Amino acid sequence: MDMPFSLPSAHALESARSWGRTQGLTLTPIGRAQGRREFLCFRPGFYVALGHVNHVEPSREVYRSGDFIKLHFRLEGESFVGQPGAVAAQTVSAMSVSTLLQPPGLAKEECFAGEVKERSVTLCCSRSFLMDELGLSGETLRGPFGTFVRGAPQQFELARFPIDAAQYDIALALLGEPQGDAFRGIYAESKAFALLHTFLTRRFDDAAPDTAGARTRERLMPVKRYIDANLHEALEMRNLAKRFGFSESHLARRFREVFGVPLFEYVGNARLTRARGLIEDGRLSIAQIALEVGYGHAANFSTAFKRQFGMTPQGARRGMRQAH
C-alpha cells in the first residue's frame, strides 16, 4: 500500500487497511508509551492523523515534512514543538488549535513530558489539494492557509488559537472507535472536511492571537490541571472559583471562551475519557472506576458512559477482551 503519510519516529506498524479509496495505517509507540496513532488518507494531499497516546515517560517524535500545512487540534495533553537541534520550542496546550508551516524536507520535533495523556487530531493539506481540488486561492483564504497557498514557507511557523465548541465536538467524534464500521472512510472524511471548514471560515485578526487571550489562558490552565487531577472529587463551581481567585460567573465565562466548552461539560468529558482508559487498563472493577472518576452511583456512570460512547462500560470491557 502506497502511503503518503508523514509518519513519526519511534513507532511500529500495527495494521493497515482500506475503506474504498481511504487508506489507513495504525501505529503503536515503541517503548513505555501506550496507545496508538492512526493515519487516514482520503485522497492525494488530504489526510488526518489521530493520536491516542499515554506518554508514560518523556518521549520524542520526529516527523519529516512534505509540502503540507498542518492543522492540529489538541484535546488533551501538552507538548513542545520545534525543529531538531533548535534551542527554542513552542508549547502546544490542551484545548487549542495550532497551524504549522515549515519548509518542505525539514523535520519537526515534538517532545512530551512523562505521565502525559495525549488526544489529538491533525489535518494535513497539500497546496495542490487546496487550490486544484477545492478551488481555493490566496484571495479567498485568510490567516495561515492564505500564507501557505501563496507559496512554500521559508521558515518554521507555528500559530496557536483557542479551540471552539464545534471544533472540539468534531475532533472528539473523529477520535471515537467505531469498531467494525464498514463505512469508516466515509464518516471520517466527512468529519475531516467539517473540521477543515470550521477553521477556514473563522475570523482572523490581522495579527497573531491577542496576548490578552493568552494571559487569560495562562490563568485558567491551573484550573484545568486541578480538574484533571481531581476528577474523583465533587467539583463545584463555587469551590473552584474561590480556590483560584475568580467569581463564579467570570470563571464560567472565561473557561468556555478559552477551552471551547462549558466547564462542567469539560468535567463530564474528562471523567468519561478517564473511565475509558481505566476500563482498557483492566485492573479496576466497573464500580471502582465509577468512584474513581467522581460518580457516586454505578448506574449513573453507566448511563453517562453509554450516552458518550454508544456502549455500556461492561460492553466496552467485553469488546476490549475480545480484541485481545
Image (cartoon, rainbow, N blue to C red):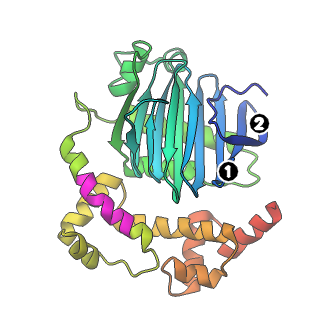
Q: Residues within 10 Å of mark 1 (few under 14, many from 20)?
A: few
Q: Residue at x 58, y 58 (%)?
A: 56
Q: Which class describes the residues within 10 Å of circle 2: few (<14), some (14-19), or many (20+)?
A: some
Quadrant containing the N terminus is top right
Q: Residue at x 53, y 26 (%)?
A: 107
- Mark positioned earlier in the residue sequence (1 or 2): 2
What type is the residue that disc 2 sits on?
A: Ser
Determine if residue 190 is in view: no
Q: Nearer the viewer, residue 120 or 46?
A: 120
Reply above or below: 37 against 248: above
- Residue 173 is marked as none
Residue 312, magenta (yes or no): no
Question: Which image quarter holds the C terminus?
Answer: bottom right
Q: Which residues are magenta?
A: 216-226
Q: Which mark is residue 18?
A: 2
Can residue 225 be found in the magenta stretch?
yes
125 relative to 181, above or below: above
Q: Where on the picture, by quarter, is residue 139? A: top left
* Residue 192, quarter of picture: top right
Query: What is the secondary structure assignment of the residue under circle 2?
Result: strand
Q: Residue furthest top?
A: 151
Of all residues, the one furthest to the bottom in this rendering is 297
Numbered circle sitting on residue 31: 1
Q: CA distance from mark 1 to mark 2?
A: 28 Å
Residue 289 x, y percent position in the rendering? 59, 79
- Picture coordinates of residue 178, whole percent (x, y): 68, 54
* Residue 223 occupies quadrant: bottom left
| Amino acid type, label 1 | Gly
